[in-house]
Structure formats: C-alpha cells, structure tokens
Image (spheres, rainbow, N blue to C red):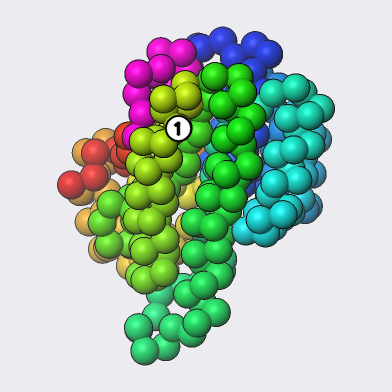
Amino acid sequence: MASDADFSDRVVLVTGAAQGIGAAVAKSFVAAGAIVHVADIDREGICKTADELGITGSALDLSDRNASAELIRAISEQRDSLDILVHAAGGVRGQTGKQIEAVSEHDWRVIFAANVDSAFWLAQAVAPVMKKNKWGRIINISSGAGLRPSLTGIQAYAAAKHALVGLTKQLSLELAPFGITTNSVAPGLVLSNPSTQKQWAEYSEAYRQELLKNTHTRRLGEPQDIASAVLYFASEAAGWVSGQVLSVDGGRS
C-alpha cells in the first residue's frame, strides 16, 4: 500500500502503542517522517515504545473523557496541529470467553469503555482541531470480530468491535465534508500481545491448523501488516476513501 508515503511534518497520535500493532504503526509513521505521539494505559510499555522511537509518550486511561480531551489539547497546542489519529487501544482487558450466564456487568462495561468510549472521546476532542485545519485522518483499529463472531468467544468484545465499525461509518458521514476521512482496519489474528498469544496457545493443534487452512495466505498476521494498511488510509492517496473497513486478515474464509 502506501508504505513509502511521506508524512513529513504531519502530527500523529497513535493510541494502544505500548506493544504490538500500535507500536508498529508508530514506528512506521516515525520512519515516514511524521511527528508522532504515543499513548497507552500501560505506563511501562508506552515509556519503552517512546524511548525506543525517540518520541513523546503518555500513560492514561483513554476511556476517561477528560483525560482523552486533555491529551488532544496538549498535543494540538504544542504542535499547532493534530493531523492523524490512529486509535489502536482497546482489547479484551484480560478476559477470556465464558458462557453468557457468567458474564458480569463489569466484564461487559469495561470492554465497551476500552474499545468504544475511548474512540468516541478522542474523535470528539480532535474533530475541532481537524476542522480548523480542513484536513484530518481518523483510523480506528477494529477487528474481524467487528464483522463476524469473535474467535475470542467474548460477547462484549464482538459487540464492542461491531459498535466501533458503526461509529467509524457515522463519523465519516459527519466529518468528511470538512476534509476529515474516517476509516477502520479490521485485523485478523495477529499474535501481537499477551492476550492474542494466550488465545492462540489455548487452541488445539487441530483447530490451529483449521484456522490456517481457512486463511488464504496460510499464515497469521504480523503487526506490520496492519501498520501498512493504516499508512495507506492516512496518506494523500486515500483522500477520497472514507467510511470504509479494510479486512487485513490474510483472506480468511
């Protein structure tokens, strides 16, 4: 895709960048010349990413509306812009699949807060900045679980990622007239963090082979596969692409 695109002087915020997909996205933008800020709830992890890339990082809970708004305000005031928001934070928050009768209210709500609330608060805060500049890119990392039942077996995760896809499309309708595109990348199974590694380890060998057989490329994804798709959506080449969800899953069938 647009892995060779030039993002010189573009100001980028990548959330969920303590590891895996978010970290790969941040690294790709840095390599393309962007001014990158990273954020995550994992303080140790985000400090490591920031130090390795020589950029600024913030540790915060993005499901906190005030915290997200303050992060956007601080970056946009310091840099006089915030051009690209890549929201990769979310995940399963340490949960595993269980029968519906065993799911608590907390289990349900914490996943929605991490995956949907955070996306909305960040978009709400960054929209005025991008409107002022008449240019912007919002890219939400959803999941194959936002298009079909989740391999995690977690009802809240599937529902939240479907909601994130819907939010992406709604934001596109509202913001595209102002020069702001909103899209989503929906990764397949990428062993990018402890949760996905645990998920893969819990599958039987027969089930693993079945999953690979039903993936056209016959391999699992890597964080860079997702980062390359993100950079395309962020590029000038994708200026007339909005409200789209791109499955990056090796051709899962």
Q: Is residue 54 above or below residue 102?
A: above
- Residue 38 in the magenta stretch? The answer is no
Q: Is residue 61 above or below residue 204?
A: above
Tell me where residue 204 appears, x and y as whole percent.
33, 67
Q: Helix, strand, or loop for circle 1?
A: helix
Tell me where residue 132 appears, x and y as whole percent.
61, 23
Q: Residue at x 27, y 62 (%)?
A: 149
The residue beneath circle 1 is 175
Q: Is residue 85 left or right of residue 141?
A: right
Asked whether residue 26 appears in the rendered view, the answer is: no
Q: Amino acid at mark 1?
A: Leu
Q: Is residue 121 above or below residue 99?
A: above
Q: Is residue 28 left or right of residue 35?
A: left
The magenta-colored residue range is: 232-243
Q: Is residue 187 left or right of residue 41?
A: left
Tell me where residue 223 appears, x and y as whole percent.
50, 38
163, 104: nearer the viewer: 163
Asked whether residue 238 appears in the rendered view, the answer is: yes
- Residue 234 in the magenta stretch? The answer is yes
Q: Residue at x 42, y 88 (%)?
A: 102
